[in-house]
Amino acid sequence: MASDPSSADARPARSQGAPPDAPLGGPFDVLVVGGGAAGLWAAGTAAARGRRVLLLEKNARVGVKILASGGGHCNVTTTLSGPALLDAFGRDGGRFLATSLRRLPPAAVRARLDALGVATKEGPLEKVWPVSMRARDVADALLRRATAAGARVATGLACVDVLRDGAGFLVRTSGGDARAPKVVVAVGGRSYPRTGTTGDGYPWLEALGHAIVRTVPALVPLVVETPWVRALAGIAEADARVSVEAGGRTLADRRRPLLFTHTGLSGPGPMDVSRWFERCAPWERPTLHVDLLPDVAEDAVRAALTAAVAARPADRIARCLPPSFPARLAESLCAHVGVPPDRRAAETSKAERHALVLATKRLTLPVAGTRGYDFAEVTAGGVALPEVDPATMESRLVPGLHVVGELLDVDGPIGGFNFQAAFATGEAAGLAV
């Protein structure tokens, strides 16, 4: 049975009533600040190499964000590999992660987890899950790996600052100070702040000389204030293409499921393109376009609608739309283009039928924004990639400082990519410290 990270191995190194300047013991070779996916992996890898590791976590237990991922099920990685895996992170992100992903590809992550007692299985959309579908099993396994290798884990200690200390580093925490020649900063970004990821690391790294690319919430539901869209809450389209356009350019294009919600749109497709509604300047006015039948050409949709009207002229026009559409969606699309859903098919004009085809293939929805960091699965932006060595995650500006996971200006779409990046960057740092 998996051990509980709140057990003795995960107790704070000192009581939280200790004075601010009280030492946390040692000596340590490596301080890992942050006990999420990247920090746990880095700590385990470094400790397995004989390094004396202290992992510091502000929460009462490690892996809190792991526990919240995937609805508590934890989509740990992806089935993709090679160029397809790198492409998921975009041009710059893929180039940066190439070395670490070759060293620790998704297949290696699955093998490591399996060796830790967490068997995995493949799911739709190239996803990989623990067979148990329990995120806790993943968090517990990563903690066991680190502690079994000798890493010391101190929970309930909020890091206050990371400072240069001669040739090494001083980490100030709510329970005292710790020193080591090497430090791995793995405190995450700003997404899901209720799990403790409140952007703490950015000011520390800026003070050490790093540039921070403007951060925005990503993989986050979209806010659409149009009443008919919100009235469709609960309806899902398993296959839709969503794209974002601004200034005559297509900024993002994803073919993934879409979910209507009481605040707008969610699901992998809309969430994958969400960053652009935060990143674009207001005057760029990005627009969202939805193709509800990506496998069917527009002319074919038009022909099918024309044939349905001819075959069932007395039927309601809403029932002549593609049979895969739920009735509420078909009726709402009719109302959206100004055609009463209960109008007889034969009474619709050619122009009205053309409008219905466009609503099916090129639906444009006004996005007011996103639901913000509270609902974002990841943070886009972070430490500028040119300032970090992609082979070791070591700062090019501050020797001995390693930055991993969500703090970096690299992120991927929904589907286990961001966990994979966290594990791979954690492995790179753990092998280098």
Image (cartoon, rainbow, N blue to C red):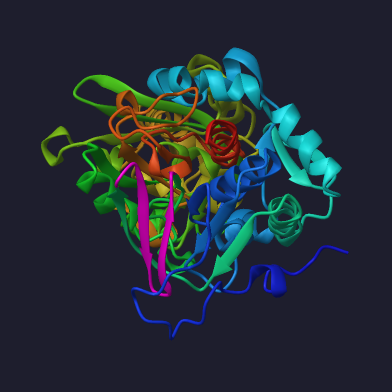
The answer to which quarter of the image holds residue 218 is top left
In this image, 18 relative to 1: left or right? left
Q: Residue furthest bottom?
A: 17
Position in image of residue 228 (x %, y %): 39, 56
In this image, 224 relative to 259: left or right? left
Q: Give the range drawn in magenta.
A: 166-181
Query: Is 97 or 176 nearer to us in this picture?
Result: 176
Question: Is residue 31 found inside the magenta-colored segment of the image?
Answer: no
From the image, give the main secondary structure of the stretch colored magenta. strand
In this image, 2 relative to 379: left or right? right
Vertical arrangement, residue 157 with respect to residue 310, above or below: below
Q: In which quarter of the image is the N terminus?
A: bottom right
Query: Is 117 or 18 nearer to us in this picture?
Result: 18
Query: Is 241 or 408 nearer to us in this picture?
Result: 408
The answer to which quarter of the image holds residue 50 is top right
Question: Is residue 173 found inside the magenta-colored segment of the image?
Answer: yes
Total number of numbered discs in the rendering = 0
- The residue sitting at 43% across, 69% down in the picture is 23
- The residue sitting at 34% across, 52% down in the picture is 201
Position in image of residue 153 (x %, y %): 60, 62
- The residue sitting at 79% across, 66% down in the picture is 3
Position in image of residue 413 (x %, y %): 51, 35
Vertical arrangement, residue 8 with respect to residue 226, above or below: below
Q: Residue furthest left?
A: 283
- The residue sitting at 78% across, 55% down in the picture is 133
Query: Is 354 or 374 nearer to us in this picture?
Result: 374
Q: Is residue 371 in sight in this rendering?
A: no
Q: Is residue 396 in sight in this rendering?
A: yes
In this image, 137 relative to 385: left or right? right
